[in-house]
Image: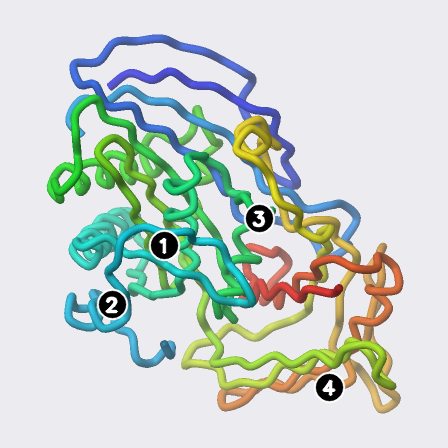
Amino acid sequence: MKFVARHARSISTGGPTPPAPDSRGGRAKGLVVVVLVLVAALAVVDPSLSATLRHDYSTLVALVSGGKSVSSISVGTSIGSCSSAVTIQPLTNPDIVNGSAVVAYPPDYCTLAGYALAQINADRAANGTGPVALAFNRAAQQHADSMLYYSYFSHFDTQGYKPYMRYTLLGGRGADFENIAYSEYSVGLLGRTAAIENAIRNLEHLMVYNDVVCCNNGHRYNILDPLHNFVSVGVAYNSTYVFFDEEFQNEYLNLSLKVTSAPSASPYQVTMLGTPILGTPVPTAIYVAFDTTPAPETRTQLESGPTEYGPGALLGGVLPPTGLFGGCGQFATGITQCASRWAFNPTAIYIAFSLNQFVKEKGPGVYTIYLVTGPSTDTAITTISIFVP
């Protein structure tokens, strides 16, 4: 197995410096081209909020031979339950409009998703990590559909959305971390389930075991992260290309989120109500990140960059109240908002706070709520985006 690697500029926040640009050429027996793109886990080394978060984003070109509710989904979800959760139909315009999209699953989707899940869990088991269950957030298939339909390859899409935005718009209320990849074949694949499984196996193997030169093991970290308990899988293909999307999820809350809108007396009041599942880690803070309002992008814009993406500008966050008078601690930099309510126990979560100070700072855009359970956004159990007009 030989590699041709191409490194894009990447910015590390608290992790090892990505390897320097390098290029290697080789010739393999097969005629398969595999491209992997990294979504490194969101990371902040401490809660001081002193820097903008970014995902490391790099690409690897490789020549290889061969080729619901949280409580209701179990590990190794059966094909029957998969078939009841997805809609098999021809590929059509996949754009997200008013929180909905026409998501086209291929005829053999349940077979392919089950195969991908088995590969993922085998890798996790081989590396001492427990299994994830198959989930059906439509963001995974919608993005795979979008890349095939519009013929591009990027974590951004033609509507300007990032992964966590798509996840939220299509119903996600946990935390979402994306890997994407594609394969290009020199022979037709249409209708060849075994060949597409082979592509998935090769892509998964490269992301876990050949990721260090390309991507500083960012794919591998995402696949093996023990906090992930679910994965939604997207697979879209034609006679030449297979697009593969893994949306790893931290689904620990049956959660509803409400936001009062301006010009109410108390605009942008956020209320998070829900029920934790057994073993949910205790949340310690909320980080608030900002993105400008998404704008449409052409294929040329998507293919030319940027070569990294992150959760936007980190504005500050929300801390639990302390004492009798509603005060709270302070972040070293950025906005600190004290929650008006912060209750968490094994049977309920109730958090309320104002986003108004953040909105006054930045204006219209997308504000993403990271409810974290430790000192890093790798420990987020929500990545919920709030769109402010």
Q: Where is residue 262 in the image (x, y as percent from the top left)?
A: 82, 77
Q: Tell me which numbered mark, 4 or 3, is placed earlier along the sequence.
A: 3
Q: Residue sitting at 70 percent across and 78 percent down?
A: 259
Q: Where is residue 136 in the image (x, y as percent from the top left)?
A: 34, 65
Q: Tell me which numbered mark, 3 or 2, is placed earlier along the sequence.
A: 2
Secondary structure found at label 2: loop
Identify which amino acid the numbered label 1 is placed on.
Answer: Gln
183 shown above or below 378: above
Q: Nearer the viewer, residue 44 or 267?
A: 267
Secondary structure found at label 1: helix
Q: Nearer the viewer, residue 356 or 85?
A: 85
Secondary structure found at label 3: loop
Q: Tell me which numbered mark, 4 or 2, is placed earlier along the sequence.
A: 2
CA distance for labels 3 and 1? 16 Å
189 shown above or below 63: below
Residue 341 is labelled as 4
Residue at which label 1 appears: 141
How packed mark 4 is, by other alpha carbons closer than 10 Å (few <14, some 14-19, many 20 or more), is: some
Residue at which label 3 appears: 159
- Give the quarter of the figure containing the N terminus: top left
Frontmost of labels 4 and 3 is 3
Q: Tell me which numbered mark, 1 or 4, is placed earlier along the sequence.
A: 1
Image marks 1 and 4: residues in contact by CB distance under 8 Å: no
Q: Position of residue 218 (x, y in %)?
A: 47, 39
Q: Residue sitting at 25 percent across and 38 percent down?
A: 238
Identify which amino acid the numbered label 2 is placed on.
Answer: Val
Q: Tell me which numbered mark, 2 or 1, is placed earlier along the sequence.
A: 2
Q: Residue sitting at 70 percent across and 61 percent down?
A: 367
CA distance for labels 4 and 2? 35 Å
